[in-house]
Image: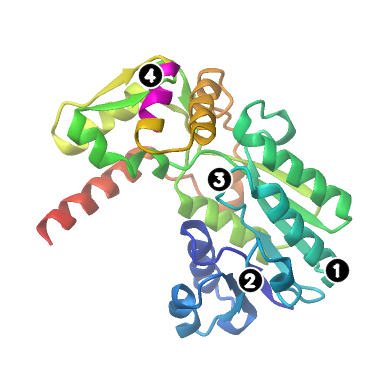
């Protein structure tokens, strides 16, 4: 039996593999699925088995899984293409007879009433209908969604968005979600279960801007703009209009409290409090300073 991680060279997938290794899983029991052999070379160097597979090429998934494997399906990043991609993975896993299919879904699952959730909801239905033993990891927002835009915030002196100032986000860093995924792939009692994963504390964008100000010593504010202006910023930066509209809709969802839930499942799975957004901000600022010095 192997533990198979799809999208293993991505930001979340690599962290899951690292967490499995850190938790004592032998490298030889871990299978990393990747599209690019060169990107997967560092994993192979650790002794992890690399199998080349592509969500868009179902034939490459036939040899990706074996009977009894525990599999983590990390959702694809190409919005609008994820349903056929995920269908190919679920069908291949079903034919192989895997022992567990864990999936990185969205906070709220079928109750998540915003556009970004739609493909996740279809995928959850596919998994349930497959008859495979499943674990649904309904991930909330990643703190890095904001800290990765730190340079832009510093350049403009503001964090800009269309989410209402009172909207709150219960985020956690990717490393916390990776630790949760590793826990359900290696532990018992997680089959046929859905977990609502989010940070322990919800914060507002004005509070986030204040944390950036404190960490950088510069005055950073939250600038709330109309949804139409927000859409224009995204399309002006070259994003397709459909994707831009989905991202603006996320800010509407924040205003409606759909990313603010704090049920505590994430902390329980990882066995510790979730990482506060202030710590992620401090790490991002430290990395930015080090890059400038380097």
Compared to 214, does 288 lie above or below? below
Dot 1 falls on a residue whose secondary structure is: helix
Q: Which quadrant holds residue 232?
A: top left
Question: CB of mark 3 within 8 Å of CB of mark 2?
Answer: no
Residue 267's label in the rendered image is 3
Foreground mark, 1 or 3? 1
Residue at 58% across / 45% down in the picture? 266
Q: Is residue 132 left or right of residue 259?
A: right
Q: Disc 1 or 3, which lies upstream in sequence?
A: 1
Which colour assignment does the render follow? Answer: rainbow
**For the residues marked 2 and 1, what is the alpha-carbon distance in whole angstroms?**
16 Å
Foreground mark, 2 or 1? 2
Foreground mark, 3 or 2? 2
Q: Which residues are magenta?
A: 227-234
Foreground mark, 3 or 4? 4
Q: Disc 2 or 1, which lies upstream in sequence?
A: 2
Please tell me which residue lies in front, 55 or 205: 55
Residue 53's label in the rendered image is 2
Residue 208's label in the rendered image is none
Count of marks placed on residues: 4
**Residue denoted by label 1:** 95
**Residue denoted by label 4:** 229
Compared to 269, does 29 lie above or below? below
**For the residues marked 3 and 2, what is the alpha-carbon distance in whole angstroms?**
32 Å
Q: Main secondary structure of the magenta part?
A: helix
Q: Is residue 147 left or right of residue 183?
A: left
Q: Is residue 217 left or right of residue 133?
A: left
Compared to 222, does 28 lie above or below? below
Residue 252 x/y as whole percent? 52, 20
């Amino acid at each position: 039996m192997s533990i198979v991680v799809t999208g293993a060279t991505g930001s979340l997938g690599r962290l899951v593999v690292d967490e499995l290794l850190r938790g004592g899983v032998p490298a030889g029991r871990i299978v990393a699925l990747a599209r690019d052999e060169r990107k997967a070379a560092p994993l192979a160097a650790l002794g992890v088995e690399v199998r080349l597979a592509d969500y868009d090429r179902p034939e490459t998934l036939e040899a990706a899984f074996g009977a009894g494997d525990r599999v983590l399906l990390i959702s694809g990043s190409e919005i609008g293409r994820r349903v056929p991609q995920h269908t190919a993975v679920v069908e291949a896993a079903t034919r192989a007879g895997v022992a567990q299919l864990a999936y990185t879904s969205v906070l709220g699952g079928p109750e998540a009433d915003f556009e970004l959730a739609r493909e996740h909801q279809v995928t959850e239905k596919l998994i349930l209908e497959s008859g495979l033993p499943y674990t649904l990891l309904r991930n909330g927002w990643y703190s890095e969604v904001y800290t990765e835009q730190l340079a832009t915030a510093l350049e403009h002196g503001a964090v800009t968005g269309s989410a209402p100032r009172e909207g709150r986000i219960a985020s956690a860093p990717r490393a916390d979600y990776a630790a949760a995924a590793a826990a359900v792939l290696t532990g018992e009692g997680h089959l046929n279960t859905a977990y609502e994963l989010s940070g322990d504390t919800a914060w507002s964008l004005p509070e986030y801007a204040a944390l950036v100000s404190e960490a950088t010593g510069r005055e950073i504010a939250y600038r709330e703009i109309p949804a139409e202006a927000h859409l224009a910023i995204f399309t002006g930066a070259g994003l397709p209009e459909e994707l831009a509209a989905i991202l603006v809709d996320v800010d509407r969802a924040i205003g409606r409290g759909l990313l603010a839930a704090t049920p505590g499942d994430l902390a329980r799975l990882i066995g510790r409090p979730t990482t506060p957004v202030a710590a992620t901000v401090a790490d991002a600022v430290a990395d930015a300073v080090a890059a400038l010095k380097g």
